[in-house]
Image (spheres, rainbow, N blue to C red):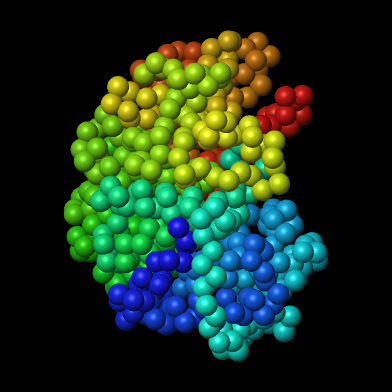
Amino acid sequence: MQFTQWLHRALQQDPNRPITIDQGRERTVEQFADRVARLAAGLASLGVQPGDRVGMLSLNSDRYVEYLTAVPWLGAALNAVNIRWSLAEIGYSLRESGTRVLLVDDVFKAAAAPLRTACACLDTVIYCGDGPTPDDMTGYEHLLAAHEPIGDTRTGGASLLGVFYTGGTTGNPKGVMLSHDNVLTSAMGSLSTGNFLTRGGRLLHSAPMFHMADFSAVMAGNLSGSTHVIIPSFTPQGVLDAIVEHDVQDMLLVPTMIQMLVDHPAAAELDLSGIRGITYGASVISEAVLQRAKQVFPNARFTQAYGMTEVSPVATLLLPDDHDDPALLRSAGRAAPHCEVKIVDPDDNEVPRGEIGEVIVKGDNVMLGYWELPDESAKAIRGGWMHTGDAGRMDDRGYVYIVDRIKDMVVTGGENVYSAEVENALAKHPAVAACAVIGIPDEQWGERVHAVIVKQTEAVCCDSDLQEHCRAHIANYKVPRSFEFVDELPLSGAGKILKRVLRQKYWEKRDAGVS
């Protein structure tokens, strides 16, 4: 399989169909294909060879979708850069992957000079914004205009499609090498359920395109004949405006985004009945948020996708009909059609149903390995199974329940406490808007359960209130012994809480370090 094959089929079957809509700028399949082939030619003129890494540091745009297609058209490899990283982290990813060319937009053009200084591998910076091209950069539109389209190299199969860096929720980000087959397996398997996207519909991109989740949505949309409706980044008003203006049918969000949408005053005033599908990930959705979302989007069918970059990224799916059972809302769903999922003990023996172990995944969606980290790759992929680092259990019907990252488990007085269980209890308190539970040093117990809380606006609560609430839901030894109230929690590009950041101030002076 090859990543660009969808475009040849679309040109043959429906060349005049709109493929991208970006703030009033609309392009057809035929126009898009011409621009992709010209961009590939332009990259080749800059010395990019098959297998070379080409990066992009940009907000969402139609040019981002062109980049995602032109690089594999040339046979090169993608490096979609996390826009939430610091300059040091961006430089690290560019140097480690040997990225030769970097595309930047108006928001990130100022980063080009320090990145050139920090990254000897970086030969060329392409400006892909809408303003005048800076003197030290190559203009995106000029590059397209200056080159005739070139043919598709037809690169595919096990060839490297891109190096996709992890969010670093438990440590430094690692470059995940994904092949054409990896990504297409995940996209086609998800689509085969018949619930993932509306065929020929309009798919809204508000989640960051650098992230594997939205990249997968781009690929699934390409395969299903979607029109990509693109806004630069997520804002509740921006999403609502795009839905109404462009008759959007499908969206990819995280539960916090869904909550922000249903909380927005304009949501109750608009006709949002055109939304047919909402796919979400990064965490489960609460029953309260789901019920409110169903009122705001009355015709929407909800699908939860669980996975990670290393599995391209989908491992399990909680399908729309599953959302009718409140008991399943804490589940991540069942194995997607393209892979197998098991729960195993530390020796890789499958545990009995209902017991907690590590979630492992097998299928053609499992990564090639980590970039230049052979030992880490061998540790993660054993016997063809990707070891996710997530602790979970599976019920008798095959539904998987994620209980924690294994590294996030708190061991207090010899007892294992899974932070997700404590977080679920805290989330039921009306004063809690968001929370994270971590283990911090304790002289008596080794670790103690510590909760970091974001309160609802104008809510009033204290430590004892929250402890009393938790005791009604979980065992006493799991109840947080200390609390910290903050305005916001640190998040990765996928919307996952960066617990290593929360732990750092407590552990940095201890021999144990920060995992």
Q: Quadrant of residue 325?
A: top left
Q: Quadrant of residue 354?
A: top left
User: Does residue 414 appear left or right of residue 5 in this picture?
Assistant: right
Q: Nearer the viewer, residue 321 or 360?
A: 360
With respect to residue 426, does 22 lie above or below? below
Q: Nearer the viewer, residue 340 or 201?
A: 340
Q: Nearer the viewer, residue 338 or 116?
A: 338
Residue at 46% in and 66% down: 4
Q: Nearer the viewer, residue 7 or 306?
A: 7
Spot occupied by residue 107 in the image (x, y as percentages of width and height): 59, 70
Residue at 28% in and 37% down: 287
User: Does residue 438 appear left or right of residue 91 in this picture?
Assistant: left
Residue at 64% in and 76% down: 44
Spot occupied by residue 368 in the image (x, y as percentages of width and height): 58, 46
With respect to residue 223, does 409 lie above or below? above
Q: Please identify the quadrant where the C terminus is shown.
A: top right
Residue at 57% in and 56% down: 159
Q: Is residue 331 visible?
A: yes
Spot occupied by residue 51 in the image (x, y as percentages of width and height): 64, 62
